[in-house]
Image (cartoon, rainbow, N blue to C red):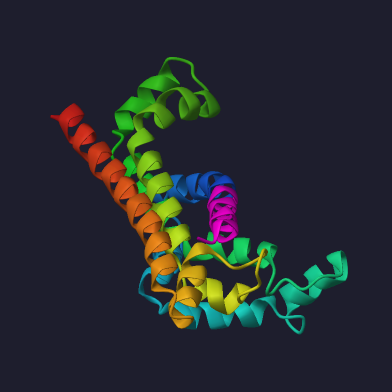
Amino acid sequence: MDWRAFEISLALAFWTLAVLVPLSTLIARALAWRRFPGRGLVEALVALPLVLPPTVLGFYLLESFSADSLLGGFYQSVTGELLAFSFQGLLLASVIFNLPFAVQPIQRSFEAIQPNIREAAWVSGLSNWSTFWRIELPLAWPGFVSALALTFAHTLGEFGVVLMVGGNIAGETRTAAIAIYDRVQAFDNAAAAQMSAVLLLLSIVAISVVNLTARRQRRSRG
């Protein structure tokens, strides 16, 4: 059992959520309630990782993170390190390929809030910020729970983008999914089975959380 690979996977999932939840909240709220030019394009770009093959997405991210690119070159000039094949690059890639798994559930929850509820809060004297914290977030919590569970599970299981962007560096970018692949390549099926069972259990828990949240939301509406 490669516990270090699991530690990296869990760290990647934690930091992905730390970055993605506030970012997704801003994007989802804007898409739910605002009408602006290019809104359809923004929604398409957010959903793109769902339909784009992971190796294709990984290739473009790898090119963007290379030292010859604008982003990768800037990062190297500031830190003196490569963005590609690093945990930081892996984190940035994780935020991008998990975007639809976080944005879409939160967006649907915001869309389910009736406009007159927000208007009543404003009439009662609440500011936009107070309305967001005291009215919108409590009503949209099912979307946040789903976003957390889906993003966490998807981060742990992602293989193609992680391998393309992070490579297979032990102790730095080798995640649990890549460690399983390594064990299979080495014909160590017993170790691969153990690690696969852990990921399977975590995935079942994540799906159960999403389903239970959805049922509870339907009951509350009913």
Q: Residue at x 45, y 22 (%)?
A: 134
Along the viewing direction, whichever of 48 and 205 lies nearer the viewer = 205
Residue 135 spot, x, y in % from top left: 41, 25
Q: Quarter holding the C terminus?
A: top left
- The answer to which image quadrant residue 65 occupies is bottom right
Q: Is residue 13 magenta?
A: yes
Residue 10 spot, x, y in % from top left: 54, 51
Q: Residue at x 45, y 68 (%)?
A: 45
Q: Residue at x 60, y 50 (%)?
A: 15
Residues in magenta, as a range: 1-16
Residue 41 shows up from this direction: no
How many labels sit on residues?
A: 0
Relative horizontal placement of residue 120, taking residue 42 as reference (left or right) = left
Along the viewing direction, whichever of 109 and 21 lies nearer the viewer = 21
Relative horizontal placement of residue 169, taking residue 53 as reference (left or right) = right
The relative height of residue 168 versus residue 4 in the rendered view (above or below) is: below
Q: Residue at x 31, y 28 (%)?
A: 116
Q: Residue furthest left?
A: 222
Relative horizontal placement of residue 87, taking residue 145 as reference (left or right) = right
Q: Residue furthest top?
A: 124
The relative height of residue 161 versus residue 21 in the rendered view (above or below) is: below
Residue 211 spot, x, y in % from top left: 23, 44
Q: Is residue 220 magenta?
A: no
Residue 182 shows up from this direction: yes
Residue 141 spot, x, y in % from top left: 37, 34
The relative height of residue 74 versus residue 137 in the rendered view (above or below) is: below
Most frequent secondary structure within the magenta stretch: helix
